Image: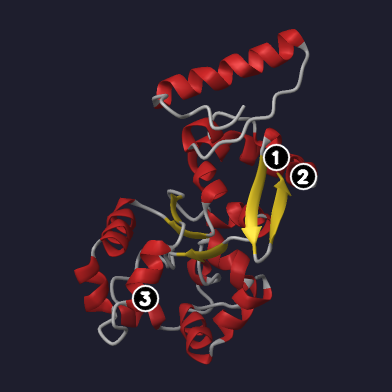
Amino acid sequence: IEEPENHMHPHMQQMLVRYLYEAQENLNFQIILTTHSSDIVKNLEIEDIRVLKKEKNKTQEYDLSVFMKDLDEDKKKFYEKFFGVTMYPLIFSDKAIFYEGDTERLFFETLLSRTNVLGAIFPESDNSIGRRLRSSYISLIQVSGDYAHRYFDFVDYLDIRTVVFTDIDYAKKFNSLDEIKEERKGEDEWKKISSNSVLRTILDLKAYESVQELFNLMQEGSCVEKVNEIG
C-alpha cells in the first residue's frame, strides 16, 4: 500500500492502521506500507518500522526490529511506551533538538521560523545559517525533564545529529551564580556536581564534585571532547 494518507484526515489514518493490523492477524498475510505521515507512523508498533534514508548515492535501510532486539528489557519498555508519544517525529528527521519545557519550545519554534530573529542572533552570517536551519529536517523533542539521554540509543541508530538543551540542576539553596560556582566540598547536599541525568551520562560527572569544576571543563573544552567521544 503506497502512501494511504493521501486524502485522509489524521483520525482516519489512525483507524486505517488499526484496521490493517486486524486484517493482517485475521487473514494471515503480510502488509507492506509506505508513508510520509507522522500520524500513521506514531500508531505503528516500533518493531514494524523500516526507515529508508538517502545517503550520498544510495538508500540506507534502518530496521527498527533489529534496533529493539539489541536493547535490554528496561529500554525496550521505554521505547514501546514513548515511541508514539514523543519519538515518532525522529523517523523523518536528520537533526534533533531535545529540550525540557515549554519556554524552550517557544524559543526554538520562534528561532527556526522567523528570519529577523535569526538575523539578530547571527548578524555576520548573511542569514546563511538561518536558511540552512529552515531547510533542514529538524525535530524539536520535548522530554519534560532530564531524560534526553534515554533517547541516545535511538538517535545514534538512525544517525541523527542531536543537540540537548538542559539545566545544570544545582543545589536549590543557592540563589546567585557566585554561590553556585563557589566550592562546597564536604557538604552532603553538594557532593555531586549535578542531579541532572543527561549531564551525568554525557560527561561522566561522578568524577567531579563541584559546579566550579563543570565551568572549568566548559572553558577548557573538555565537555566538547567528551561529547565527541560518544558521537
Marks 2/1: CA–CA distance:
6 Å
Label of residue 76 in the image: 1
Front in this rendered view, residue 1 or 111: 1
Query: Based on the displayed image, in which of its 4 quarters is residue 19 positioned?
Result: top right
Q: Residue at x 67, y 70 (%)?
A: 230
The type of colouring in the image is secondary structure
The type of residue carrying mark 1 is Lys
Q: Secondary structure at mark 3?
A: helix
Q: Which residue is mark 3?
A: 129
Q: Residue at x 36, y 75 (%)?
A: 129
Query: What is the x, y in percent for residue 138?
Result: 45, 58
Query: What is the x, y in percent for residue 106?
Result: 27, 55
Query: What is the x, y in percent for residue 96?
Result: 49, 59
Q: Is residue 29 left or right of residue 40?
A: right
Front in this rendered view, residue 94 or 199: 94
Q: How many marks?
A: 3
Marks 3/2: CA–CA distance:
39 Å
The type of residue carrying mark 2 is Asp
Q: Residue at x 52, y 31 (%)?
A: 40
Q: Please say whether residue 77 is visible from this viewpoint.
A: yes
Q: Are marks 3 and 2 in contact (CB under 8 Å)?
A: no
- Position of 133 relative to 7 (above/below): below
The C terminus lies in which quarter of the figure? bottom right
Query: Based on the displayed image, in which of its 4 quarters is residue 50 positioned?
Result: top right
Q: Nearer the viewer, mark 3 or mark 2?
A: 3
Query: What is the x, y in percent for residue 28?
Result: 78, 13
The N terminus lies in which quarter of the figure? top right
The type of residue carrying mark 3 is Ile
Q: Secondary structure at mark 2?
A: loop
